[in-house]
Image (tube, rainbow, N blue to C red):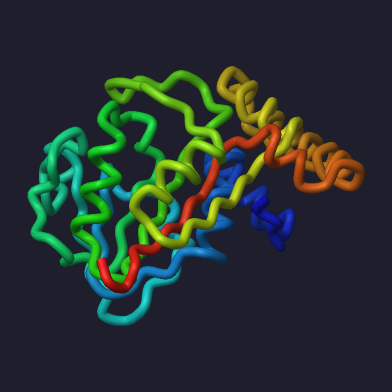
């Protein structure tokens, strides 16, 4: 599935002016439409708290438990994602794994652990970059295609939805903007790329985003009887 968004240029420019990349901005807008947090939420690889929290819907009485290996982030649980999680079975209603799956070498173990700690019918939201520069934090191992994500998640979860975002020109400018330091010029070039991708999409449809994705938002659900 491709991420078709109903956003205004004002919203987009505001995020770009904040210093957010086009990839991060598009992910946040998709998260606003697709992600709902409720009950007990495990934020895996939480870092210092991402900008997506300004967009994601949270139901009343939502409790977020942060998990990160870096002591400086003051996470509720300090733990690596490369080993079994220090969390009991079936305690989470929702799990989040935003922009860190590519940093985990033992990714199959991590997916199994997410499945274990979720309650039946629990959901996991995974944000995974694709056309994205090498980013060792401290390691950078993988880039996952839509096909790979679908197969990996369906080995454990019953329902999987994958939303791609980007496009040929936006993916290119997302990479180029790393070296473009003038903020106004970055915004200008991004808007030009957005217009070119909208034009290209008229001719090739969703193949534009699916062939040249900046990244994906994956939504997977654990089965009722598991």
Residue at point 65%, 53% (across, down): 1
* Image coords of residue 96 (percent x, y): 34, 54
Residue pushed farthest bottom? 60
Q: Position of residue 184 (x, y in %)?
A: 68, 34
Q: Nearer the viewer, residue 139 or 10?
A: 139
Residue at the spot 35% in from the left edge and 20% down from the top edge: 136
Q: Is residue 28 left or right of residue 222?
A: right
Q: Residue at point 59% right, 23% down?
A: 181
Left or right: residue 151 compared with residue 60: right
Q: Is residue 202 above or below residue 124?
A: above
Find residue 196 and report its horizontal and vertical position in percent.
84, 37
Q: As displayed, is residue 105 above or below residue 93? A: above
Q: Position of residue 91 (x, y in %)?
A: 16, 66
- Residue at image point 21% right, 53% down: 66
Residue 130 falls in which quadrant of the image?
top right
Q: Quadrant of the C terminus?
A: bottom left
Q: Number of callouts in the render?
A: 0
In the picture, measured across the screen, residue 168 lies left or right of residue 81, that is right
Tell me where residue 48 sits by quadrant: top left
């Amino acid at each position: 599935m491709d991420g078709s968004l109903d956003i205004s240029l004002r919203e987009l420019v505001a995020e770009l002016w904040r210093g957010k990349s086009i990839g991060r901005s598009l992910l946040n807008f998709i998260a606003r439409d697709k992600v709902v947090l409720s009950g007990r939420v495990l934020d895996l690889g939480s870092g210092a708290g991402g900008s997506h929290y300004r967009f994601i819907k949270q139901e009343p009485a939502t409790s977020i438990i942060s998990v990160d290996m870096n002591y400086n982030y003051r996470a509720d649980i300090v733990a690596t994602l490369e080993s079994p999680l220090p969390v009991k079975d079936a305690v989470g209603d929702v799990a989040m794994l935003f922009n860190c799956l590519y940093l985990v070498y033992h990714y199959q173990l991590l997916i199994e652990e997410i499945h274990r700690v979720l309650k039946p019918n629990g959901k996991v939201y995974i944000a995974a970059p694709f056309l994205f520069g090498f980013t060792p934090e401290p390691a950078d191992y993988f880039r996952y295609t839509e096909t790979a994500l679908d197969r990996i998640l369906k080995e454990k979860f019953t329902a999987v939805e994958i939303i791609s975002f980007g496009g040929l020109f936006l993916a290119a400018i997302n990479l180029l903007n790393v070296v473009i330091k003038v903020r106004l010029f970055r915004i200008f070039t991004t808007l030009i790329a957005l217009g070119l991708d909208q034009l290209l999409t008229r001719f090739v449809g969703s193949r534009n985003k699916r062939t040249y994705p900046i990244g994906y938002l994956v939504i997977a659900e654990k089965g009722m009887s598991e």
